[in-house]
Structure formats: C-alpha cells, structure tokens
C-alpha cells in the first residue's frame, strides 16, 4: 500500500476533513469517485465525494461522512492506494516512495549506513530518512551527487556523503 495522504482534522460541521497530501500526483489520487483504503483498515475504505484545495492541503468530503463527529473519527487516518495499481515511472531516475522504503543505504565500499524508512518531499528536493545501525535517524538529500546509484533489484542505495552529514 502506498500512503497518499493523512487526514489531519475535521473542517466545519458537514463532515469535511483536511488532508495533508503525501503524493506527487494529488490530482490523480484525489478525484471524485476514487476509493482509498485506510490505515487503520477499519476506518475505510473511503470513497471521495468532492475535493477542493485549501492553504496547501485539501478539503475532502467522503461519501457517508455526514457530520463533524464522523469527520473527527477519521483524524490521523492514513489514506492509501494499492501500490500494484501504480504504473512504473517512465524516467529511469524516478522512483515511487514504496520502491525506496526498506532499501539498505551503503557507502561505495558496501558498508551499511542505514535503512530507508521514509521519504519526505520538499520544495527543492526529496529527503531520504534513514534509520542508522545505532538507532538514530539521519536525513540525506535524494540528489544524484549524494545518491549516485539506486539498485532496486539488489535492495540498496549507494551513497557518497560529505564528511559530517550523518553527525547532524
């Protein structure tokens, strides 16, 4: 499953919710009639009735959610799509989040740096969130200079990082 958004909070009294988008293609994922699975599963599936933009997020109405209490019950629910329904990117240097999460991050000598646990999408570039072997978290810009090789079949990313980046 691929997380495409998180229900942040209710909006108003008619059952609408504010959704924080977690996809590069919100116009494809959040369309009237689209059915989204949920995490936790018992909250859904949810069918989108209508969507409108609001301050960098989306206001979404789901079928069957008629009032603020129904919307409040959806707070912090993740909305998802089946990752098998998503076509592979045409660009060989483009990846979906679900393809990267779980990959081992290694240096050019093959020594483990960490494991990718999440991708944060920023305005300039994406950030890989790594779980380091000692349990700490590290952020690595997902740019060609620092991540020159993505080996999906081998389950790893090769990273060439500047001195001290992992100590931040």
Image (cartoon, rainbow, N blue to C red):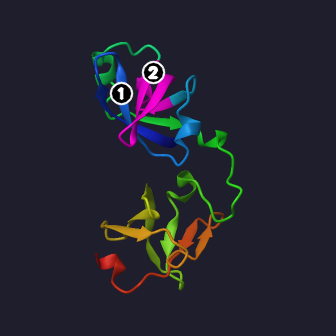
x%, y% of residue 168? 28, 75
Give the residue furthest to the right. Answer: 90
Give 127 or 112, whichever is nearer the viewer: 127
CA distance for labels 1 and 2 = 8 Å
Is residue 143 magenta-colored?
no
**Which residue is disc 2 drawn over?**
62
Instruction: Please say if the residues under marks 1 and 2 sit with CB atoms less than 8 Å apart.
Output: yes
For the N terminus, the quadrant is: top right
Q: Residue 148: name its quadrant.
A: bottom right
Which residue lies at the image location 28% right of the left edge and 21% below the top edge?
A: 12
Q: Residue 127: name its quadrant.
A: bottom left
x%, y% of residue 67? 32, 14
In the rendered image, the vertical position of residue 158 relative to residue 104, given as above or below: below
Callout 2: SS = strand
**Which residue is disc 1 drawn over?**
17
In the rendered image, the vertical position of residue 1 relative to residue 157, given as above or below: above
Q: Which residues are magenta?
A: 37-62
x%, y% of residue 41? 44, 29
Which residue lies at the image location 52% right of the left edge and 33% below the top edge?
A: 30
Viewer can see residue 109: yes
Give 86 or 109, whichever is nearer the viewer: 86
Callout 1: SS = strand
Q: Would you say the magenta stretch is mainly helix, strand or loop?
A: strand
- Precedes in sequence: disc 1 or disc 2: 1
Horizontally, is 123 left or right of 14 in the view? Answer: right
In the rendered image, the vertical position of residue 43 relative to residue 137, given as above or below: above
x%, y% of residue 47? 51, 22
Which residue lies at the image location 44% right of the left edge and 13% below the top edge?
A: 64
Q: Residue 85: name its quadrant.
A: top right
């Amino acid at each position: 499953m691929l997380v495409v958004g998180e229900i942040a909070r209710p909006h108003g009294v008619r059952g609408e919710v504010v959704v924080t988008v977690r996809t590069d293609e919100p116009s494809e994922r959040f369309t009237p009639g689209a059915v989204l699975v949920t995490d936790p599963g018992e909250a859904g599936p949810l069918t989108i009735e209508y969507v409108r933009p609001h301050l960098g997020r989306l206001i979404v109405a789901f079928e069957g959610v008629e009032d603020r209490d129904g919307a409040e019950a959806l707070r912090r629910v993740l909305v998802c799509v089946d990752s098998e329904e998503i076509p592979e990117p045409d660009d060989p240097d483009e990846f979906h989040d679900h393809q990267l999460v779980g990959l081992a991050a290694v240096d050019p000598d093959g020594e483990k740096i960490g494991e990718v646990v999440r991708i944060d999408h920023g305005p300039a570039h994406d950030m890989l969130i790594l779980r380091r072997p000692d349990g700490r978290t590290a952020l690595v810009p997902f740019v060609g200079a620092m991540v020159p090789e993505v080996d999906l079949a081998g389950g790893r990313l090769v990273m060439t990082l500047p001195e001290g980046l992992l100590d931040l």
